[in-house]
Image (cartoon, coloured by chain):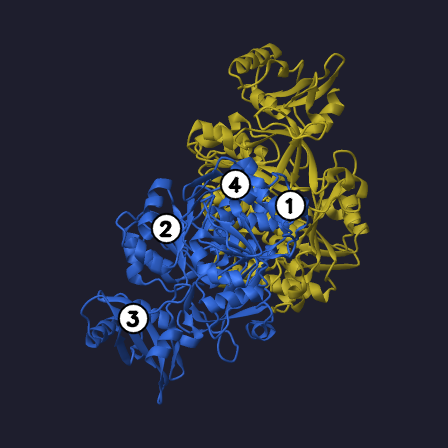
Chain colours: A yellow, B blue
């Protein structure tokens, strides 16, 4: 029996998709060529002493080299630390020390930023197209391409000794308070969990349907849960893969046209930027990380962009993805609203929405509670943080810390983080829905709603607005009264206070940074 | 963390697909109702002492009760023996004793045939719509519907203690020589392997594409690898399930129309019978078990039937399914030929085709060798048959005993069983291809090619023909000469002998029974 491990994903391409392409900057490789490079790299890394359990930190954008490292390190049984380069420098170094990075692989894109790391980490591999790219002055330093060129192209016997339950990778997420938290993924968990996103998308024809015939370009960085699984999916299904490196939105659109890209993933902010580009149209987009506003959804639909919203996270992996409900015409306006916000649980996932006593709330499309989830790929907890783990992983369930509700048809709506939601007079106000409604106003570019202490109600909502043009508090209040009469929001949801600002800070994952907003405005 | 076990497949339907239907004879159930029945049944069975490791034999056609038993027994950790009712009676009893069946569940359809078993097995459950159906005179006997009615509708705590690696089911396949062979499936293997068929079909748009929007009716019996996974797939993806029971082809067509069936599985013989029905059209069909002839493929295509061919078996699970190759218009005649015979390996499957020295043969579309396969869901071997297991399961690979070759584009062609293929002058003659070409003759209804000893060549092919009308050996020789000039066959493939018969025997799996033919004609 073969084990269910990462490097087994790519072996089939040698038979079924040997000529299929992986495109990355000026590099074009077939899967057969890429597999040869992976073998040669793995044999060279073995000579350097990298083997079972060695932790290897990688600092790169989405390139073929980062993609190759997934498979080479898997064959060796090494642990891939996908370094979260959006963490503040101090946290980034903390994560590398906490994970135990023994080697670091740094692309030329990051060499300047990584210079301060030379004093702390002695073993480096530099990834660059430039054969003369200078090596840092550290104990050991190699060029990636020289390791590839110098390695034997033969299968590694240890590749058949890696087990489903061995750790494949580790990732650090922004801590809501203080230090980043590490999550380790066993091969079994990351493969079951990451591939299930694509199984779900393949099993439904609406939204961001994905399959073997797609040409895939991930805009979600590999460090973030392996680009939500795109490090595995194209090889798994034999699809063409386009890696955008550090391309800006205009170049991304150029790549879409030139390479025939049909499927992408990105956060809503990136979707926003791409829709500002003239040539962006007719692709499928999986998006998530923050709510998708009606305005953005409509703009996307007008351009022929078919989208789905995903809910999940590094500590639970994928939980749900929006599709048109059964019986709803997938091309209707109604379907568009469901695709924007109503998510169907992935196969084999369960979600329980609970009140403060831990009882399940009714699936009535309005009763908000805490989102708990469980699945066969739930990680074991936060690495070396037993207290944090005990708080969040309870009786086989993961307490997400998010608020949400179920519609009667079983679709899940996620209303935002529990800590930043507003509890007014004992009732939750879903800030995500409120933000979505406010963002529909033509003069609102970005909006965040945060809780404000209130003597009478406990909390009341405050809206922080980045305007596009002239707009007043009164305009927005009038606008929201209209939304009440449309039945979209309740009257008591209308914020008590509106603050107009020049910019709204985002987190490393591209979400509204509500912790920072609370610091600034409360 | 939840384990990756069978009963977890159906729990999600309570949220996402509570109102979706399962139709079985006169019974219509929603998944919510069916889950309630499963819980009540499982609680009653627990009271009867059925628990972890109890082996339960089930003798039924495809009904909702057999479907429910999959989930109820999974919750209890019992082992489901899907009794192969197409085995000869002596072998059937052998399989039940060998598996260690403690309880047997028998539907009224089979009670007459099962009567001789009363002396051998003391604990019975009878499955019938008739509340007064007589119970057999054995030590303990119950009515299934009374157990369902009398059970508590509550979750079983032991359901959370079942592990991925626990045995879920056992199945006995026809032994090529002598006794049937038992294969046990752990939850992990049967779920990974069975669901992968559907992932593959969902990831490709050509052929028998399957997804959440399909209405599924399995004609492959549940006993045969859980209807090739259809015991799991509809609940997994939330699709409507139609269970045909013992329906004849005319009733099957009526069910297709009335219930809106869009996806089915069946052996080619069943496809043949359905195409003889006037109303059969516009469904997707997964077929396999024996070659799909060009004639049958064309008839199917003319009726709007989109098909794929699957290769696999109970001792390897699924290996490959035909799809249109990349770059080939899926609606073209070329695609039709690929779908009929050129199979793409499922994701994470590897196949190695080897010569007699164990070396891989080139993927040139003609060099035939022995088919070896490996995958993360390969079973551990034949139950209580260490010698047979050692012969077939070698270094993590399964020696299928089949012959095949790869086309240069990576598509697999399976040319038939090694034992019944013909080796002439050191060269394999692919009998499956030969049968497919001969079956294109308008006067040939069924054909089997078997090896005939020959002093000069070692073996030569002999064709056993069931004609449709007047046809002579000369006609067939002329027809084959035409096929040589078309490049479809080689001259030395033409059989030395043609025998015309009234009927060709089939095995319990609906394949040509070549063992019997060899006995009769050689």
Q: CA distance from mark 4 to mark 1?
A: 37 Å
Q: Residues within 10 Å of mark 4 (few under 14, many from 20)?
A: many
Q: What residue is at 70 percent from the left and 26 percent from the top? A: A420
Image coordinates for residue A21, horizontal then vertical, percent: 50, 55
For the point 44% across and 53% down, the residue is: B61
Q: Is residue A414 above or below residue A259?
A: above
Q: Name the one closer to the observer, A42 or A438.
A: A438
Q: Which residue is mark 1?
A: A225
User: Which numbered dot is residue B206?
Assistant: none
Q: Earlier in the sequence, mark 3 or mark 2?
A: 2
| x 66%, y 26%: residue | A504
Q: Secondary structure at mark 3?
A: loop
Q: What whole-number distance in Å separates the C-alpha atoms at marks 4 and 2?
A: 22 Å
- Label 2, on which residue? B247
Image coords of residue B321 (percent x, y):
44, 58
Q: Residue furthest bottom?
A: B455
Q: Are marks 4 and 1 on the same chain?
A: no
Query: Residue at label 3?
Result: B487
- Determine the secondary structure under disc 4: helix
Does mark 2 fall on the same chain as mark 1? no
Q: CA distance from mark 3 to mark 1?
A: 51 Å
Question: In the picture, residue B424 is in which quadrant?
Answer: bottom left
> Is label 4 or label 3 in front?
4
Q: Nearer the viewer, mark 3 or mark 2?
A: 2
Comparing B296 with A93, the one in front is B296
Q: Residues within 10 Å of mark 3 (few under 14, many from 20)?
A: few
* Residue A433 visible somewhere in the drawing: yes
Image quadrant of residue B270? bottom left
Label 4 or label 3, whichever comes before in sequence order: 4
């Amino acid at each position: 029996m073969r084990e269910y491990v990462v490097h087994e994903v790519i072996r089939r391409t040698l038979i079924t998709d040997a000529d299929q392409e992986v495109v990355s900057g000026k590099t074009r490789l077939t899967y057969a060529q890429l597999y040869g490079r992976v073998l040669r790299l793995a044999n060279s890394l073995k000579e350097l002493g990298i083997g079972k359990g060695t932790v290897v930190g990688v600092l790169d954008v989405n390139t073929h080299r980062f993609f190759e490292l997934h498979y080479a390190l898997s064959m060796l049984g090494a642990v891939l630390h996908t370094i979260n380069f959006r963490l503040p420098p101090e946290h980034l170094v903390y994560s590398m020390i906490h994970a135990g990075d023994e080697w670091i692989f740094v692309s030329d894109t990051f060499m300047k930023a990584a210079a301060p790391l030379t004093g702390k980490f002695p073993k480096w591999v530099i990834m660059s197209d430039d054969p003369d790219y200078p090596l840092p002055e550290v104990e050991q330093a190699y060029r990636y391409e020289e390791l590839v060129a110098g390695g034997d192209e033969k299968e590694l016997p240890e590749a058949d000794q890696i087990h489903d339950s061995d750790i494949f990778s580790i990732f650090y997420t922004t801590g809501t308070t203080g230090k980043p938290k590490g999550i380790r993924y066993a091969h079994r968990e990351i493969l079951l969990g990451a591939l299930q996103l694509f199984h779900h998308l393949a099993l439904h024809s609406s939204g961001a349907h994905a399959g073997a015939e797609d040409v895939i370009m991930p805009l979600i960085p590999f460090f973030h849960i392996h680009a939500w699984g795109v490090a595995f999916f194209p090889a798994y299904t034999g699809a063409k893969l386009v890696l955008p490196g550090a391309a800006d939105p205009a170049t991304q659109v150029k790549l879409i046209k030139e390479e025939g890209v049909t499927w992408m993933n990105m956060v809503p902010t990136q979707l926003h930027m791409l829709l500002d580009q003239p040539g962006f149209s007719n692709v499928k987009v999986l998006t998530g990380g923050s709510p998708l506003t009606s305005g953005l959804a409509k703009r996307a639909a007008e351009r022929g962009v078919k989208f789905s919203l995903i809910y999940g996270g590094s500590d639970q992996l994928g939980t749900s993805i929006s599709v048109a409900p059964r019986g709803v015409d997938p091309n209707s306006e109604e379907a568009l609203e469901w695709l924007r916000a109503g998510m169907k649980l992935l196969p084999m996932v369960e979600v329980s929405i609970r009140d403060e006593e831990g009882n399940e709330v009714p699936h009535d499309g309005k009763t908000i509670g805490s989102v708990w989830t469980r699945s066969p790929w739930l990680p074991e907890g936060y690495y070396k943080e037993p207290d944090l783990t005990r708080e969040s992983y309870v009786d086989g369930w993961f307490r997400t810390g998010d608020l949400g509700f179920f519609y009667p048809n079983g679709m899940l709506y996620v209303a935002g983080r529990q800590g930043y939601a507003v509890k007014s007079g004992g009732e939750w106000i879903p800030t995500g829905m409120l933000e979505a409604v406010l963002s529909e106003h033509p003069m609102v570019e970005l909006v965040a709603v945060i809780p404000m202490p209130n003597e009478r109600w406990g909390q009341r909502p405050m809206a922080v607005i980045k305007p596009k043009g002239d707009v007043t508090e009164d305009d927005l209040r009038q606008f929201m009264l209209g939304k009440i009469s449309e039945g979209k929001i309740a009257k008591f949801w209308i914020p008590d206070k509106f603050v107009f600002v020049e910019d709204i800070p985002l987190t490393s994952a591209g979400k509204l940074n509500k912790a920072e907003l609370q610091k600034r405005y409360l």
